[in-house]
Image: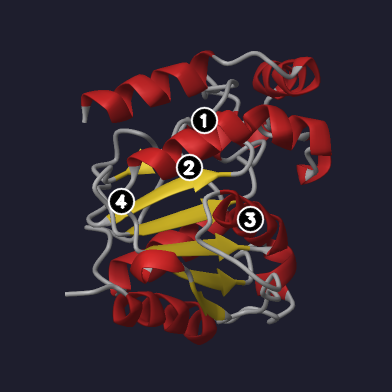
Amino acid sequence: MATWRSLNRRIVACERCERLTAHCRKIGAEKRRAFADWDYWARPVPNFGDPQARLLIVGLAPAAHGANRTGRMFTGDRSGDWLYRALAKAGFANQADSTSRDDGLELSNCAITAICHCAPPDNKPTTDEVEQCREWFTATLDLVPAQVYLALGQIAWRGLTAEARRRDWLTGKTPKFGHGAAFPLANGRHLLGSYHPSQQNTFTKRLTEPMFDAVFRQARKLMSP
């Protein structure tokens, strides 16, 4: 746990990407009218969850008025509402609501990280910014003894497959991303894909709650007893 806390402190203190640092602070200063009374987090968002997790969820980046505001992954926006509702149904979370860092939410056997720990403009980090953040991603994979790696979206899938190849967990052709796509990795590990629970996907019904819930049931089946 001390190592987990140390890693999170290093993530929060990171200022490698000037564009992202400036953007997070700008959003935190300007705020959204609905959150005018909030003291925005406005810096890199740390990992969240159980450091001994067998399920590691990988997202893209914090939302400008979600995790960049609250300081916790997938907290304070509609994507987080979908994710924590699904996690609660699957027994990975003690509650379905996620509104702030002190709302009592706890994860069990599940941890959440991201390809990029800062909120990027238009939700699009550059290739260089993703690379600058890779140290935190690799350190998280080193630390969490996951069996199932769940990629929320194609960018997370690409990040996971690239890292799996570097670690010799993956050889041969890179598996194609798709919702519910599952691929075995070395030493009993598994890669699992899901559409990201973004408003773009949920409002258009590209991703429905039954589809999302099925992914977490699949994750449970892939985890050894």
Q: Nearer the viewer, mark 3 or mark 2?
A: 3
Residue 136 at x, y percent in the picture: 52, 31
Which residue does the numbered mark 2 point to in the structure image? 73
Vertical arrangement, residue 83 with respect to residue 142, above or below:
below
The color scheme shown is secondary structure
Q: CA distance from mark 1 to mark 2?
A: 7 Å
How many numbered tags mark residues here? 4
Residue 157 at x, y percent in the picture: 64, 61
* Outermost residue toward the left in this view: 225
Q: Which label number is shown at residue 156? A: 3
Vertical arrangement, residue 71 with respect to residue 194, above or below:
above
75 relative to 125 in the view: left or right = left
Which residue does the numbered mark 4 point to in the structure image? 145
Q: CA distance from mark 3 to mark 4?
A: 18 Å
**Tags 4 and 1 in contact by the CB under 8 Å rule?**
no
Quadrant assignment for the C terminus = bottom left
Q: Nearer the viewer, mark 4 or mark 1?
A: 4
Amino acid at the residue labelled 1 = Val
Q: Residue at x 67, y 78 (%)?
A: 178
Which residue does the numbered mark 1 point to in the structure image? 45
Q: Nearer the viewer, residue 170 or 87?
A: 170
Q: Secondary structure at mark 1?
A: loop
Mark 3 vs mark 4: which is more N-terminal? 4
Mark 1 vs mark 2: which is more N-terminal? 1
Q: Nearer the viewer, mark 4 or mark 2?
A: 4
Q: Secondary structure at mark 4?
A: loop
Amino acid at the residue labelled 3 = Ala
Q: CA distance from mark 1 to mark 3?
A: 16 Å
Quadrant assignment for the N terminus = top left
Vertical arrangement, residue 198 with respect to residue 178, above or below:
above
**Tags 1 and 2 in contact by the CB under 8 Å rule?**
yes
Q: Nearer the viewer, mark 1 or mark 3?
A: 3
